[in-house]
Amino acid sequence: MSSLLKVKNLHTSFFTQDGEVKAVKGVSFHLEKGETLGIVGESGSGKSVSSLSILKLLPPAGRIINGEIMLDDKKLVKADRSTMRDIRGGKIAMIFQDPMSSLNPLIPVGKQVEEMIKTHGNHSKKELKKMVLDLFEKVQIPDPSKRYDSYPHEFSGGMRQRVMIAMALSCKPSVLIADEPTTALDVTIQDQILKLLRNLQDEMQMSIIFISHNLGVVAEICSRVMVMYGGMVMEYANINDIFKHPKHPYTMGLLQSIPSIDQDKAVALQSIPGSPPDLSNPPTGCPFHPRCRYARKICSVQVPPTSEISEDHGSRCWLLSKEAPVNNNPFSEQGSSND
Amino acid sequence: MSSYIFKRMAMTIITLFLIAILVFFLMHAIPGGPFTAQRELPPEVEAALNEKYNLDQSLPRQLISYLGGLLKGDLGPSFKYPGMRVNDFIREGFPVSAKLGLITIIFVLAASIPMGIVAALKNGKWQDVLSMIIATIGVTIPSFVIATLLMYVFSLKLGWLPAFGFDKPSGYILPVIALGGYSMSFLARLMRSSLLEVMGQDYIRTARAKGLTEFNIVVHHALRNALIPVVTVLGPTIAALLTGSFVIEKIFALPGMGKHFVTSITNRDYTTILGITIFYATFLVVMVFLVDMFYVLIDPRIKYE
């Protein structure tokens, strides 16, 4: 069976006064029906731009340069505006990071959800209102009929995100792109929203692309993970392999940076030295090499190819090539075994 | 809400009285008086005049009697035009200024808002560049230069439009453009920048992600948000346009109110200065009040208690 959503060799750039900024450089992935794919990376790794590219919601300076995005059998990169409008909200819905600014402050929340349903189908006024109230019920907004006429500023952050989720789910999309949906919320609300998303996913049989920089959150909700850095996919694998057998120094660095609750207080928190690359002036070769403790000469010269470790586990690192040296190579003893 | 409106009205009346008192003292602080002229009057004549207009009394006493008249709606007699009262100036001049002002306001709104919207939506394209060139000219070149230029081209050279007076309806065209040029340009620029900012907001991206048409997004989501700063400026602008402009009325020989305002100052025509200032201030305060009320209609986040 072919995948629900396929992204092949996506290149997206921003054209600024200082020239072309390549935000996404050859990203490929697929999304199966009903699964949750996590996209992890630091700010500027290209995770949001990749997801915005799918819906072609890039800001005016951004453009898809190359690649193909397939939803079922529809090619989206060259699709016209009216096709994209049908897909946005109807087939692929999106929720955003900041629920504070993602809702129009001047329109009651009920109307904002209603508008989405109205755009993608014909319903009577009465039906519309009932559908919205049912959705509010589903996302656990208390007292829906009273909240229908409330304005966004009368809601807390978590409640607004519930409204966003209600809106996103209103037309029963097959794919939900959640771009850091819990980042702006405090931890208890985060947990509630994640649980809600998981329950709704089971109920509605949809696929989720979950973008986050928080590996803990990703572990909780995703079945597969894709780690991005400098506009490229560094490693992809199922959730167990990523946490138990990471095959990329960057993934390893990210995992080591997660503090554990029983950690000795005397030990300093781990971090990856350096800062993410400046995309308008990216490093040559592997984008991670300036921060990588295993970097060798070749890393700064050529972008490493993606080595397949097993089916659906790949990593873009020179350490995995056949010619890689044995010393100072965390992956050498393990060889090809992958249990 | 109604108690807020009541409070605001009381505040408005107090504000106007404070303005009257302030202007009264400022005006008397200017050297000279209504009867000081190049050719000196015989002292007894000046004394008689001063007595007639109560100028021989102490300032607080004058103020109190003036405020007493003001409460009854009487703005007092003109010192410079015997037999005329300030109320007469307003009664004669205001309709002329107000009619021109009203037409100008319609012109300003009808031109600036569409211009700003088109410029913002076609950001960087020729429509934007053209609108902003026009708007920059309107903001930078003073109205009297534009007025004379328009008059020279359209009245003198081409002979299409009358150079003065309102005898024919076409007489309104040039004064309206000259009077409204600045406001039109200013509002167009404001509308453009405000809409541009709104179009970059997260909730516009949300609206796009819903699959709405671009038209729908602009009309239902962007415009209302973008109009808030425009409405703020609109209040004082409308007040200013309605009460007339000395320069434009002078150039086009229009019998409006603006001329009285300026000549009364050079003439030290105390009551006229005060009367017209209070009249203008009333307009301004009322417009600002209306704008504040209008906010409630567009922005649910604003509530007055």
Image: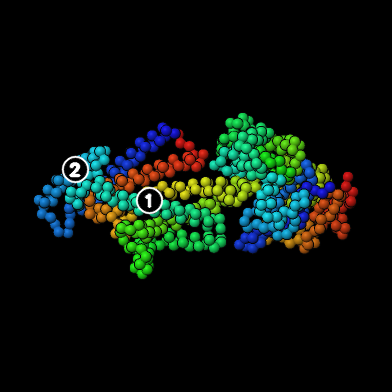
Quick check: B284 above or below B41?
above
Percent position of residue A143, x then y: 61, 30
- Quadrant location of the C terminus of chain B in the rendered image: top left
State which chain disc 2 sits on.
B
Viewer can see residue B162: yes
The quarter of the image holding the N terminus of chain B is top left
Q: Residue furthest bottom?
A: B157
Q: Residues within 10 Å of mark 1 (few under 14, many from 20)?
A: some
Circle 2: element type:
loop
Q: Please, what is the three-letter code of the amino acid marked with disc 1? A: Leu
- Which quarter of the figure has residue A260? top right
Chain ID of residue with mark 1: B
The residue sitting at 87% across, 53% down in the picture is A332
Q: Write the residue at 33% across / 38% down.
A: B14
Q: Position of residue B17 (x, y in %)?
A: 30, 41
Q: Nearer the viewer, residue B286 or A238?
A: B286
Mark 2 or mark 1, which has the lower sequence index? 2
| Disc 1 target residue | B102
Q: Residue tagged by mark 2? A: B58
* Amino acid found under the numbered disc labelled 2: Ser
Residue toward you, A22 or B297: B297
Instruction: Point out which mark residue B246 bears.
Output: none
Mark 2 surroundings: few (<14), some (14-19) or many (≥20) residues within 10 A: few
